[in-house]
Amino acid sequence: MSDSAPTSAKLAALEATLRAHAPLLIAYSGGVDSTCLLAFAHRTLGDQMRGVIADSPSLPRQALADALALAREIGAPVEVIQTEEMENPDYASNPLNRCYFCKADLFAHMDAIAHERGFAAIVYGENADDPPQHRPGSQAAREFAVLAPLREAGLTKADVRALSHTLGLPTADAPSQPCLSSRIPFGTPVTRKALAMVEAGEAHVRTLGFRVLRVRHLEEPGEPGGFRALVQVAPEEMGHLANLRTQIEAGLLALGYGAVEIDPNGYRSV
């Protein structure tokens, strides 16, 4: 990651895009990209913007609370909407393009809000490193004419992190945190029970001091309960596993997993 700030030309392009399409609705998740976009838009547009965060079983309760607290710290208005992707069998069946149905549901809600309240455009936090052709959410964005100001201004992930540092955002060095459904392999149905088990499992592992981790929810017909937990922690944190393995396993077994495995390769974001 580069420590250098994004060029003045990129920042000028970002500001120009935001001003040209105000007033704006911003899809906000509390992640690195959307938080940077929310903060920069608030600094640029003031009350001519509003964030929208989608609440569903795939969003951990702590992540929602943290995102709302951060928005208050920034001073940006954010409202919570309930999305219904879990009721859509196309999403719940967990196909390779699962994210499309989630984003389409979110953007449909935001499109209705924009029309009802007179917002001129909807934007979201895709950056210049995100390949639109490989991201199902980008297809939904195109269908709803949702703009990606960070990408259009040429801001890479490194640029976004550097700008976040400049803005004083605590997310500047935060790890990526995709939704809980991403812990369930494609083709395995996404259920409320599975999401609740993943959320509780990761919360348990986090209480033991781990910061970057995943609990993968795997079908295991031969195990009690029918599921196995695959625990992954960041390579730099794996040295703590030896002393805490028993506590990790006990906590996850208590949640209903029939077996617990620690991934010897650890977790690396992609």
Image (cartoon, rainbow, N blue to C red):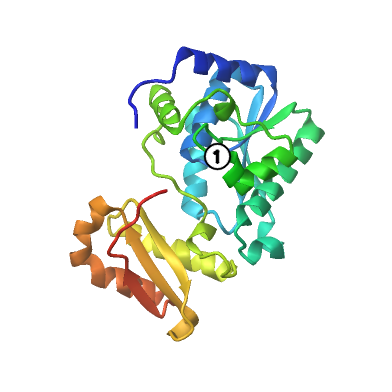
**Left or right relative to 59: residue 258:** left
**Left or right relative to 175: residue 235:** left
**Quarter of the picture holding the N terminus:** top left
The percent coordinates of residue 60 (x first, y second) are 50, 55
Q: Name the residue under label 1.
A: 131
**Left or right relative to 198: residue 42:** right
The percent coordinates of residue 113 (x first, y second) are 75, 38
Label 1: state its secondary structure.
loop
Residue at image coords 49%, 30% = 36
The percent coordinates of residue 120 (x first, y second) are 75, 26
Q: To which quarter of the image does residue 207 belong?
A: bottom left
The percent coordinates of residue 85 (x first, y second) are 67, 57
210 relative to 76, above or below:
below
The answer to which of 251 and 172 lies nearer the viewer is 172
**Left or right relative to 47: residue 241:** left
Residue at image coords 78%, 40% = 112
Residue at image coords 47%, 13% = 8
Q: In this orientation, does residue 266 appear?
A: yes
The answer to which of 30 and 148 lies nearer the viewer is 148
Query: Looking at the image, how many numbered discs can be counted on the residues?
Result: 1
The answer to which of 24 and 126 lies nearer the viewer is 126
Local packing at callout 1 (Cα closer than 10 Å; few below 14, some 14-19, many 20+) is: few
User: What amino acid does circle 1 point to?
Assistant: Pro
Q: In this orientation, does residue 75 appear?
A: no
115 relative to 233, above or below:
above
Query: Which residue is at the far front?
Result: 133
190 relative to 259, above or below:
above
Residue at image coords 74%, 45% = 108
